[in-house]
Image (spheres, helix red, strand yellow):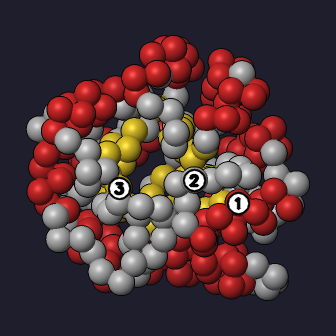
């Protein structure tokens, strides 16, 4: 088992819920990404999802699009990000997942990207625009490298397609709680229990729910229906707000800590 699998096994054994944090890599710069990763580990984040900056992030709403733009402006490239991951690994064993678009893998070379990511200390890849029907070679390369392929299920995913997708995953299944792009929402969708039950009919993997969770109350509600909660845009918004502050890291970590505490209090 790699770090993601080990963490979810530990959470299950302890009867606790998991918290997955998303940030845009290189926003506002890679040193901040490094420092935030270490700080998030200290406040109890279970998995850190790093968005690899890309020029055309189709699955992302405005908040995360702007984070990707700031990451590109700070000079963040896949190679520099992997150097940062390696530096994080010298201080922390927090499970790390890259949120990435396939164009970057294709440009670098799928096998090379996976191998270099694994060597740096990456535990999983969530390739947003790689259909499972076209992922056979990718999955073989991921298995050989010991990296988890994370797959998405949406509210619009029919039962037969859920049955096709989820057995291909490792680590956890990411349930997108609403249709559309990433972004903060004012309320939690009402059909979460129904959808997680449908997913669980086809896999024993943990289910993590994201897309729209933006405050501790929402995080607590969502955690009751899943093994983990994913929060992205709300954290990225804090980074945008405090990006030029000298105390960026403690301010963002304190906010994340409130979300972690809400999830950990959920049975």
The residues tagged by marks 3 and 1 sit, at their Cα atoms, a distance apart of 20 Å
| Residue tagged 1 | 68
| Image spot of residue 147 (x, y percent) | 52, 28
User: In percent of the image, x 53 and y 70: which residue is there?
Assistant: 233
| Residue tagged 3 | 176
Which numbered mark, 1 or 2, is in the foreground of this view? 2
Q: Considering the numbered disc 1 on the image, is that residue within a helix, a strand or a loop? A: helix
**In this view of the protein, which residue sits in the foreground, 5 or 111?**
111
- Image mark for residue 58: 2
Can residue 34 be seen here? The reply is: no
**In this view of the protein, which residue sits in the foreground, 108 or 30?**
108
The residues tagged by marks 3 and 2 sit, at their Cα atoms, a distance apart of 15 Å
Query: How packed is label 3: few (under 14 Cα within 10 Å), some, or many (20 or more)?
Result: many
Q: Are marks 1 and 2 in contact (CB under 8 Å)?
A: no
| Image spot of residue 91 (x, y percent) | 69, 51
Horizontal arrangement in the rendering, residue 14 relative to residue 48 (left or right): left
Is 103 rendered above or below residue 141? below
* Marked residue nearer the N-terminal end (1 or 2): 2
Q: Quadrant of residue 260?
A: bottom left
| Image spot of residue 165 (x, y percent) | 30, 31
Number of numbered discs on residues: 3
Which numbered mark, 3 or 2, is in the foreground of this view? 2
Q: Are marks 3 and 1 in contact (CB under 8 Å)?
A: no
Is 208 rendered above or below residue 119? below
Can residue 131 be seen here? The reply is: yes
User: In percent of the image, x 52 and y 39: which residue is there?
Assistant: 129
Is 138 rendered above or below residue 165? above
């Amino acid at each position: 088992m790699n770090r993601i699998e080990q963490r979810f096994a530990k959470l299950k054994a302890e009867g606790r819920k998991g918290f997955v944090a998303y940030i845009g890599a290189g926003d506002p710069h890679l040193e901040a990404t490094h420092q935030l990763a270490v700080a998030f580990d200290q406040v109890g984040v279970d998995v850190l999802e790093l968005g690899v900056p890309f020029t055309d992030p189709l699955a992302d709403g405005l908040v995360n699009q702007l984070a990707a733009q700031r990451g590109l402006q700070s000079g963040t490239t896949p190679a520099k990000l992997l150097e940062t991951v390696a530096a994080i690994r010298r201080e922390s064993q927090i499970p790390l997942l890259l949120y990435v678009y396939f164009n970057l893998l294709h440009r670098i070379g799928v096998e090379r990207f996976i191998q270099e990511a694994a060597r740096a200390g990456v535990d999983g890849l969530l390739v947003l625009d790689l259909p499972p029907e076209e992922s056979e070679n990718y999955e073989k390369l991921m298995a050989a490298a010991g990296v988890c392929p994370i797959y998405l299920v949406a509210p619009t995913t029919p039962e037969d397609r859920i049955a096709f997708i989820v057995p291909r995953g490792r680590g956890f299944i990411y349930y997108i709680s609403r249709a559309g792009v990433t972004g903060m929402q004012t309320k939690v969708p009402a059909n979460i229990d129904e959808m997680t039950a449908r997913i669980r009919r086809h896999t024993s993997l943990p289910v993590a729910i994201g897309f729209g969770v933006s405050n501790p109350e929402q995080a607590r509600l969502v955690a009751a229906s899943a093994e983990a909660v994913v929060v992205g845009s709300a954290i990225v918004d804090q980074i945008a707000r405090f990006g030029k502050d000298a105390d960026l890291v403690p301010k963002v970590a304190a906010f994340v800590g409130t979300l972690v505490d809400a999830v950990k209090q959920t049975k």
